[in-house]
Amino acid sequence: MRAFFFSLLGYFLTPWGLILMGALDSSLIFFLPLGIDFAVIILSARKPEFFWLYSILATSGSVLGAAVTFWIGRKVGEHGLTRLMKPSRLERVRNRVSHHAGVSVAALAIIPPPFPFTAFVLVSGAFGGNPWAFFTTLAGVRIVRFLVEGGLAAIYGRRILTWMQSTVFEVFVGILIALAIIGTLISGIAVLRSTRRPRKQEACS
């Protein structure tokens, strides 16, 4: 099992894996706090000369995943959001998002978790946010975030690589994987229940 987890980690620490991680990080179901950030840092520490490329790949994946989430929000509309989010959380997000707030919401993409960025993308799509302005700003702030992380990793790469060879790193990876599995299962179950709820209501009516 340990070998499987580390082989899975090894896949995400590749260019294609980085794009996939970025896309999953902006999706409704996948849950791994700071996963994409750590992937950029580790890859940049291994090959400092390519830190700029890893930043671009991570940004591309993030925009791709956010585009899917934005489209889902646009598809389900305002009323459909009640099936995907708790009413209390939806109300808080809706108070910050308006038809003309796409740029300001996308700019918040530079803030790392626990900020609920995915929920804001979903609501922005449902409320008819301007996709061009939204994703242009999103790409801009994400590339800045990843370039800063990758640049620092390129400078302090030796220390990071030394840390990766320690037992502490193995424990840290194990905790991250456990969080990813538990969080993804909880998110997946919540989305599955939300899609079944309308059918049950129709059957009762």
Image (cartoon, helix red, strand yellow):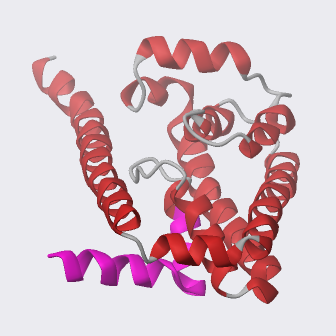
Looking at the image, is 70 positioned above or below residue 94? Answer: below
The x and y percentages for residue 170 are: 34, 67
Residue 166 appears left or right of 45: left
Looking at the image, is 128 positioned above or below residue 32? Answer: above
Q: Looking at the image, how many numbered discs can be counted on the residues?
A: 0
Residue 81 appears left or right of 193: right
Q: Residue drawn at (61%, 20%), measured in percent from left and top?
A: 93
The x and y percentages for residue 179 are: 32, 49
Q: If the image is split into quadrants, where does the N terminus sit?
A: bottom left
Looking at the image, is 128 positioned above or below residue 9? Answer: above
Choose between 127 and 163: the one closer to the eye.
163
Q: Residue drawn at (15%, 28%), measured in percent from left and top?
A: 200
Residue 154 appears left or right of 15: right
Q: Picture quarter containing residue 104?
A: top right
The answer to if 163 sits in the magenta stretch is no
The x and y percentages for residue 7 are: 32, 84
Q: Picture quarter containing residue 124?
A: top right
Identify the residue at the far left of this view. Answer: 204
Choose between 37 and 171: the one closer to the eye.
171
Q: Residue drawn at (40%, 32%), measured in percent from left and top?
A: 84
Q: Picture quarter containing residue 55?
A: bottom right
The x and y percentages for residue 145 are: 79, 55
Q: Residue drawn at (63%, 71%), measured in percent from left and top?
A: 159
Choose between 43 and 121: the one closer to the eye.
43
Choose between 184 and 120: the one closer to the eye.
184
Q: Main secondary structure of the magenta part?
A: helix
Q: If the image is split into quadrants, where does the C terminus sit?
A: top left
Looking at the image, is 2 positioned above or below residue 110? Answer: below
Q: Which residues are magenta?
A: 1-23
